[in-house]
Amino acid sequence: MQHLTTKNPTSKRLLAGAATATLLAFGLTACSDDSASSKPKRIAQIDHLTGRTTAVNSTRGSSMLSRVLS
Amino acid sequence: MLPISAGNVTYLKPGTVSPYVQGNIQHVGSGLSLSAGGTEVELTDFEIDPGTSKLYGNVAINNEPAADHALLFQLDGSTLKPLRAAKKTAILQGTKVEVSKDAAPLLNKTFKTDAVKPLQLVGIATITINTK
């Protein structure tokens, strides 16, 4: 998974702020603001993952995917 | 739907590093089955490495193990949408899932076809993480 292209710095700040607020609201581990350093700023870290992954078939190439095992 | 069995994720500030989602997402005990012409290929125990945009898994052909931790799918996160929250979950949506360059020729050989192309798009992933 790679980066989201956002050229507008204001949009980046708004996005980061919104994401941080969202994560705090939902009980994730929010990380301290280390924007003064050159290290990438961690917005959240989630350990002990649970949940699910789905993939929506979007092309004719997916017609071979016949069955999900569980 | 593939249940997430274990793992961890670090979400970095978008734009500061690529990729901005890093960690490890495991799906032990589940997978996909591909079948055609009397041949069945089972892809199981997926492990997603967001940092390298790769999805690994085990392969069995007609119930016989064929490969462990093989590179099955390449992930393209350029269309990934910002992390969003829903009821008790955090959602990462929009990553393209493509047949890896390693898997495509092996699938073609197994199914005696040339229909599977490297980096062929097979779906758009949504990862839903429980937060409570």
Image (cartoon, coloured by chain):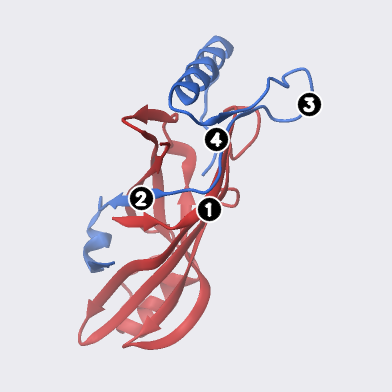
Q: Colour of chain A?
A: blue
Q: Which residue does the numbered mark 3 point to in the structure image? A: A38
Disc 4 or disc 1, which is closer to the eye?
A: 1
Amino acid carrying mark 1 in the image: Gly
Distance in Å between CA atoms under marks 4 and 1:
21 Å
Neighbour tally class for label 2: few under 14, some 14-19, many 20 plus, Cα within 10 Å: some
Residue at image position (55%, 35%) is: A3
Which chain is represented by red in the image? B
For the residues beneath circles 1 and 2, the answer to whether they share a chain is no
Residue situated furthest top in the rendering: A10
- Mark nearer the N terminus (2 vs 3): 3
State the SS at label 1.
Answer: strand
Where residue B30 sits, quadrant-wise, is bottom left
State the SS at label 4.
Answer: loop
Q: Is residue A29 left or right of residue B63?
A: right
Distance in Å between CA atoms under marks 2 and 3:
33 Å
| Residue B33 location (% of width, % of height) | 28, 72
| Residue B61 location (% of width, % of height) | 36, 85
Amino acid carrying mark 3 in the image: Ser
Q: Is residue B2 left or right of residue A21?
A: left
Amino acid carrying mark 2 in the image: Arg
Whether tag 4 and tag 3 are in contact, CB under 8 A, the answer is no
Please give the label number shown on residue B7.
1
- Mark nearer the N terminus (2 vs 4): 4
In the image, residue B50 above or below residue B20: below
In the image, residue A29 above or below residue A50: above
Q: Nearer the viewer, residue A50 or A42?
A: A50
For the residues beneath circles 1 and 3, the answer to whether they share a chain is no
For the residues beneath circles 2 and 3, the answer to whether they share a chain is yes
